[in-house]
Image (cartoon, rainbow, N blue to C red):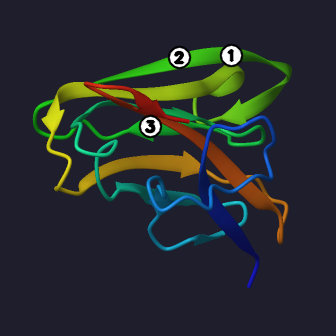
């Protein structure tokens, strides 16, 4: 079976950096997906920034993802920014010249002692064994975790 390993990292200077701090550890539930297929993913925000509640989650879509469609959860507004691709890719309605660049969830404060689930669907590239990193920024009423 052709699988992907999916990882959410807090936004750092390098794609391959993981945060070792106990304060920030955003993860993607079920961290494997099948190459070349569409998959529903869940970004898990386990807590706020210290005692401060979460007010926004920004997730960068890695290169190679064919599409990304966010789920709008209760109390959250969702926005998707786009970026142009160098070479159009095949889509259901014909060639696609823009793909999702970032998904932004903004909303009611998520208390620091509660977990948030942010769902989205992606079209995974057909390159088995590749690790995809979804760089994420968690913004809180007081500060942010990068």
The image position of residue 58, as x and y in percent, is 47, 30
Mark on residue 69? 3
The image position of residue 81, as x and y in percent, is 53, 16
Mark on residue 138? none
Neighbours of disc 1 within 10 Å: few (<14), some (14-19), many (20+)? few
Q: Which of 56 and 29 is in front in this view?
A: 56
Return the residue at label 1.
83
- Say if 73 sits above or below 95 in the image: below
Q: Give the CA separation, mark 2 to mark 3.
A: 11 Å
96 relative position to 85: left or right:
left
Q: Determine the secondary structure under disc 1.
A: strand
Name the image quarter holding the C terminus.
top right
Q: Determine the secondary structure under disc 3.
A: strand
Which quadrant of the view contains residue 56? top left
Marks 2 and 1: in contact by CB < 8 Å?
A: yes
Which residue is at a point 59% across and 37% down the rendered structure image? 67
The image position of residue 48, as x and y in percent, is 29, 45
Q: Nearer the viewer, residue 91 or 133?
A: 133
């Amino acid at each position: 079976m052709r699988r992907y390993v999916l990882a959410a990292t807090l936004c750092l200077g390098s794609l391959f950096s993981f945060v070792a701090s106990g304060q920030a550890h955003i993860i993607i539930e079920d961290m494997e997906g099948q190459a070349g297929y569409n998959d529903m993913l869940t970004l898990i925000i386990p807590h706020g920034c210290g005692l401060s509640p979460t007010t926004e989650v920004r997730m960068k879509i890695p290169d190679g993802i064919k599409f990304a469609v966010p789920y709008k959860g209760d109390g959250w507004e969702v926005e998707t920014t786009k970026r142009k691709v160098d070479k159009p890719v095949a889509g259901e309605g014909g060639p696609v010249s823009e793909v999702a660049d970032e998904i932004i969830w903004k909303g009611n404060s998520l208390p620091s002692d509660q977990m948030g689930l942010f769902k989205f669907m992606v079209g995974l590239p057909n390159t088995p064994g590749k690790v995809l990193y979804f760089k994420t920024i968690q913004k809180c009423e007081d500060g942010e975790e990068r």
